[in-house]
Each structure stands twice: as structure tokens, then as C-alpha cells.
Amino acid sequence: MEKQYHIGFDNSHGALYAILPGDPGRVEKIASHLENPHFYCQNREYTTWLGGINGKKVLVMSTGMGGPSTAIAIEELFKTGVFNFIRVGTCGGMALPVTGGDIVIASGAIRQEGTTREYVPIEFPAVANLDITNALVEAAKNLRLTWHTGIVQCKDSFYGQHSPDRMPAGYELNSKWEAWKKAGCLASEMESAALYIVSQILGARSGCVLNVVWNQEREKKGMSNPHCHDTEAAIKTAVEAVKILINKN
């Protein structure tokens, strides 16, 4: 096949699994956990390394920030033969028990973004694959991490979340934020809805594990609010989950 237009490679890699950070700068760090990792390709925001887990080839590829570039990544990786996707990213906590340094395994996402509306009407839920979610939970338990699983908010505007009162649409942003909190939403991030919806429509499997950077709701209440930018726990969870999935297949 021809090389895919955006990600820059074809189906010769032979990988069925892909671990997907948003940040190109995290790709090499994640790949270092694989067997025989090596640089594979770089085009636009898509930096790709190839390695192995339990003898099976695994890609690590950045998706960039937000839904549009994530959707393109899933579409083109799927065309090259990848069937299983695990996003490794960061999030901000919303529920008070979710603290910086914890990990969140997103079982579903609130579709407060635009990309997935061009795939399927808003009533259709963005839900993770159960096998991958269960593998991520098992991995977090094996690693003895502090983890949470549940719904995350997926939005398009980082500054709309952090500076809603500055926005002309702030009244809507604030009211929806309060609704998500009351409904038990765990955290906020920017890519999971596109990952889940596109995977669902293609017939692929996907899941998502997130490092909690901090929790602005804990800060508002004067509670302890550690900041954690180290994604190592989420990375190890994703790699361990791929091992579990490979061993079960």
C-alpha cells in the first residue's frame, strides 16, 4: 500500500497494537519500555517508534493535541493494520478524590468537542473497549498504583476550561462544568472522545490511561493539591496492559 498521507508510513510495520501519547516528546520515553525500540517515522505531529512486547510488534506514535489530529491518527493507523489503541496522556482532576499523581482509566468520555459530531450524532456514547479497559485496570492493580476508572470530560478548548469567565460563552462552559462534576466526572482532557468514537466506527479496540497533573477543584476548596508531571505510572500501566492483552490472545 502507499504511505498514509499524514502519519507517513504504510503497513509494513506488522504491528497490531499502538500506544498513543499526545506529545511527540513522550514517544521515545514510552518506546524505551519496549523490546528493541527504534525510530520509525516522523511527519507533522506524528512521531513514531517501533518496538516489541512479548515478541509482538508495537508502535508508539504521538497524536498531537485534540480531537482532529487524534481522529486522523486512528484512521490511518487502522488502514496500516493496527487494531488495538491505548492512549497515554495527562488530565486535570475534577472529582475530589482524584489527586495529582493518580492515574485515571477512562471508561467513557463526555463529547464536549467537535470532531466526533462529524462521525455520529451526539446521542451516541463515547465508550472504551471493555477488554482494553479491564487490562488497564488489571495492570494498575499489578503495579499497585492509585487508580480511578470512570467518565472523563473531553473538550476542545484548554483555556475555555481554565479561563471560562474570560470567554463570551463562559456562562455555558461554567454551567456544564458544574453538571459534569455533579454527575461524577473524574477528570478533563482533550482526546479520548475522538479515540473512542473513531475506533468504534472502524471496528477497532481502544482504551485510555491518564496521569493526573493536578485537581483545580481541590485547589478551590483549599485541599492538598500536589502537581505531578511525571507520566511514568501511566506509561507502565499501558505497557503492562498490552502484555496482558497479548497473553490472553
Image (tube, rainbow, N blue to C red):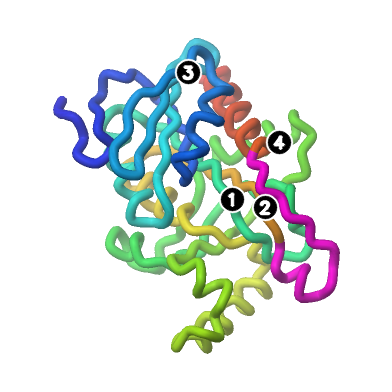
Q: 159 and 209: which one is in front?
A: 159
Residue 112: numbered disc: none
Question: Which amino acid, mark 2?
Answer: Val
Instruction: Judge whether 22 appears above or below 167 on screen.
Output: above
Answer whether labels 1 and 2 touch (C-beta < 8 Å). Answer: yes
Please report the residue visible at 26 percent of the width from the left and 19 percent of the height from the top.
12
Q: Quadrant of residue 243?
A: top right
Please report the residue visible at 58 percent of the width from the left and 59 percent of the height from the top.
152
Residue 90: numbered disc: 1
Instruction: Judge whether 90 appears above or below 28 on screen.
Output: below
Question: Which amino acid, mark 1?
Answer: Thr
State the quadrant of the N terminus: top left
Is residue 128 rendered to the left or right of residue 42? right
Q: Work out whether mark 2 precedes mark 4 in sequence or the reverse, and give the earlier one.
A: 4
Q: Label 1 neighbourhood size at 10 Å, few (<14), some (14-19), many (20+)?
A: many
Dominant SS of magenta comes to loop
Answer whether labels 4 and 3 touch (C-beta < 8 Å). Answer: no
Q: How many marks?
A: 4
Please give the residue where the numbered disc 3 appears in the rendered image: 37
Q: Quadrant of residue 124?
A: bottom left
Q: Label 2 neighbourhood size at 10 Å, few (<14), some (14-19), many (20+)?
A: many
Residue 140: numbered disc: 4
**Separation (CA) of disc 2 from disc 3:** 27 Å
